[in-house]
Image (tube, rainbow, N blue to C red):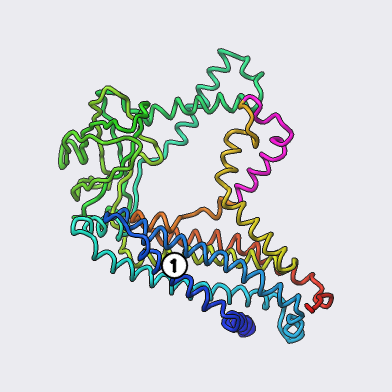
Amino acid sequence: MQRIFAICWLTWKAALRFKLFLVIAALLILAVVGLPLVIKDDGTAQGFTQIILTYTLSVTTGLLGLSTLWLACGTLARDIEECQIQVVATKPIARWQIWLGKWLGIVTLNAALLAIAGGCIYGMLQWRATKLPADEQARLRNEILVARGSAKEKDYSAEIDSQTKQILAERLKENPGITNLSEADQFQVLKQIQEQVKAAYQLVPPAYTREWKIDLGIAKNFIHDKPLQLRIKFNTANKYSGTTYAGMWQIGDPNGNYWRTNFESLPQDTFHEFQIPANLFDKDGVLTISFLNPNDTTLLFPLDEGMEVLYPESNFAINFARGLAVILCWMALLAALGLAAASYLHFPVASFFSLAMLMVVLSSGTLAEAIDTGSVGAGTEDAAGHSPFDVVLIPAFKAVLAVTSLTQTVSPIDALSSGRAITWAQLGITFGQIVLLLGGIFAIVGIILFYRRELATAQGTS
């Protein structure tokens, strides 16, 4: 470890000598302090959060990400190209120790920069919060500057898949011609059946009551006497944005302790949060929620985001620190990616390759859309899966998406700006998947390439 720490310190000295650390720190401070001062919020807690948290954390992540890739590619590739690595390699130090020392140096540089940026953001957040109106300050403290856990209804995926397969089997008996359809067409038939089955779990027809059973789990042991929040979202077939829909909510045991609202009129396709009294769940920690639809229109509550119970999990400072730790995990992966590329490629090519890999990860939504439609082109659905490009690229997209999905664990920016808790379990999963698994793969590949590279053939720059 002494040799690894020595290389780590040399990486720090190089960053300080070339003023990289000071320049990035100045840019981060300018961004996280100057941006909220230049861009004024609208005086609401939501607008305040958008400026202070969302924008500043996004800028911080972007600046650190680009500087990490540039430094990771440059620190090793330049040492090789300028024949400086030979001086280190001739000493009693293994190449894997050189590689890990540089990676550790970049990660600790990022940790220091992230601590500076995080301290500025947190200070700006607390100072600017005092400038809001009293009611918005209360909303900010209750809904955003908190760490709220989330509880949802049980996952019905298994039941939906089982019923979908059962209905498909019945249709095949009634219409054997379905088996003669192409694979893409059969996939579309399966999706249509699945959506019909899913509708039974999501729709609330007029004059009907829908009931949700939310199991709070172990959270029931530490949320006694604490108010909860209900977060809902619904859609209708009517896409006119000016229409609102009434509804009555009842939370708690109908035969015991419960709380009921009046008929409230709310717009569709929008998240709504309202506070509910404490201690409405039963002894098993199950919270019963009922909704009566008095409208003449069917309402649809999506299974993934239609109904959610939020409860206090920890304080904002701890949650903010865990969010910064998630960002640091991302930077550690980028450092491993850049060093792996520089272990074999020259600096310009390594930088281009690293940025290309980053673009692939950021384009995962486009890849997923292509997989869902079964085609990479803009052709008709009937042609999906028939072109040579689809035959080759769709399986490749699935493989790439399976790998990139490991990087999509928890979004610290979204969680912090909405007052969601980033749990220690989520942080542990993020560290395991991003740093240990993916970062470890890049490290192994990079170290092997570094060992196979002939350093004596490197040409110095003139």
In screen coordinates, is 122 left or right of 29?
Answer: left
- Where's residue 210, x and y in %? 29, 31
Q: Residues within 10 Å of mark 1 (few under 14, many from 20)?
A: many
Total number of numbered discs in the rendering: 1
Closest to the observer, 57 or 145: 57
- Where's residue 163, x and y in %? 47, 27
Q: Secondary structure at mark 1?
A: helix
Q: Residue at x 68, y 78 (%)?
A: 98
Closest to the observer, 234 or 409: 234
Q: Amino acid at mark 1?
A: Ala
Relative to 24, say whether 158 is above or below: above
Relative to 269, say whether 418 is above or below: below
- Where's residue 66, x and y in %? 57, 64
In screen coordinates, is 2 left or right of 240?
Answer: right
Residue 81 visible in this rendered orientation of the protein: yes
Q: Residue at x 43, y 72 (%)?
A: 29
Quarter of the image that includes the N terminus:
bottom right
**Is 402 covered by the magenta stretch?**
yes
Relative to 190, say whether 352 is above or below: below
Magenta part of the protein: which range?
A: 382-403
Residue 1 visible in this rendered orientation of the protein: no
- For this orientation, the residue located farthest to the right is 457
Chief secondary structure of the magenta span? Answer: helix
Quarter of the image that includes the C terminus:
bottom right
Instruction: List the residue tagged with mark 1.
Output: 31
Q: Residue at x 57, y 35 (%)?
A: 372
Q: Residue at x 69, y 59 (%)?
A: 353
